[in-house]
Amino acid sequence: MSDDGLLTEFCTWLGAERRAGAKTVETYARDVRAFLCFCAEHTGEAPSPTTLGTLRAADFRAFLANAAKAGDINATRARKLSALRTFFRYLHQRHGVDGTQLSLITRPRPKRPLPKALTPDDALSVTTDIGEATDTAMEQTRDAALMLLLYGAGLRIAEALALNVGDIPAADDALRVTGKGNKQRIVPLLPAVREAIAAWLKRHPNPGRGEPLFTGIRGGRLNAGVAQKNLRNFRRLNGLPEHATPHALRHSFATHLLAGGADLRSIQELLGHASLSTTQRYTDVETTQLMDIWRKAHPRA
């Protein structure tokens, strides 16, 4: 059977027996066709059930390596590997081809996206002008304190909204934060953050020590969706990038500290990361930014 006939038969099986959608059939057909073309060149033989059954794990790795060389990212190569596994499942059912060697290939892990930080000017704009997104003095003061706490202390939005009034320490004391897995960490509070929180507490509807630090207009604990919506409205009014979110303020905290000379271990402790490898992603952000500056500024770039 020719490779075209094999591919046609596979697509028919995929659509009729596996009930795959037209888009999936089209994508898998494209990926399998690329693999068959590679095999013809790689082995010097026309692909057939017989020749495909003789492929070794090294041959499949060579195909994925060739795809990477052509510019495929990990997620694309993982998709191609998924298509091949389905293809060899079909070959096993219809032609008795052994796909054991393919099962030895591990799925390429997609790279975690780099944290998207705001520029210092954009972060400052959010923390000082966020009140433009709301109508009442209460909301304006509350949102300013919340955003400044996220940027000034690197908190997650859930961590900040879980705080009670009594959690705010006295002057010169650090804030104790409960993060993921109930792990606690200590973070310092900048004078500007303290001032913003103090201003908010003057407008707080019920500033008892056991009450939520940040409340909604009806007095209950502020919902994260409300804070996200207010920042979304603000960024659209002020032309900020789409990644200007509450969590981006935490990324900005870490990125700007690193740019200012802070060491990774200290940033890890401040962010509450269990693993240093998570914090090391911020060095990639710094490298990316430096390369962008170099490309824009160097006369020979």
Image (tube, helix red, strand yellow):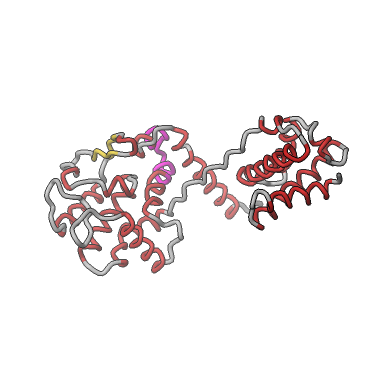
Q: For residue 50: magenta?
A: no
**On screen, residue 58 above or below 143:** above
Question: Residue 299, image x and y in percent?
Answer: 63, 54
Query: What is the chief secondary structure element of the magenta stretch?
Result: helix
The N terminus, quarter of image: top right
User: Residue at the spot x=52%, y=46% of the render?
Assistant: 113
**On screen, residue 55 above or below 147:** above
Question: Residue 14, image x and y in percent?
Answer: 69, 49
User: Residue at the spot x=44%, y=32% of the render?
Assistant: 276
Q: Is residue 126 visible?
A: yes
Q: Is residue 125 visible?
A: no
Between 23 and 116, the one nearer to me in the picture:
23
**On screen, residue 14 above or below 108:** below
Numbered range of the magenta stretch: 255-267
Horizontally, residue 107 falls left or right of residue 271, namely: right
Between 128 and 203, the one nearer to me in the picture:
203
Horizontally, residue 216 falls left or right of residue 299, namely: left
On the image, which quarter does residue 46 sit in?
A: top right
Between 23 and 260, the one nearer to me in the picture:
23
Horizontally, residue 111 falls left or right of residue 30, namely: left
Between 84 and 38, the one nearer to me in the picture:
84
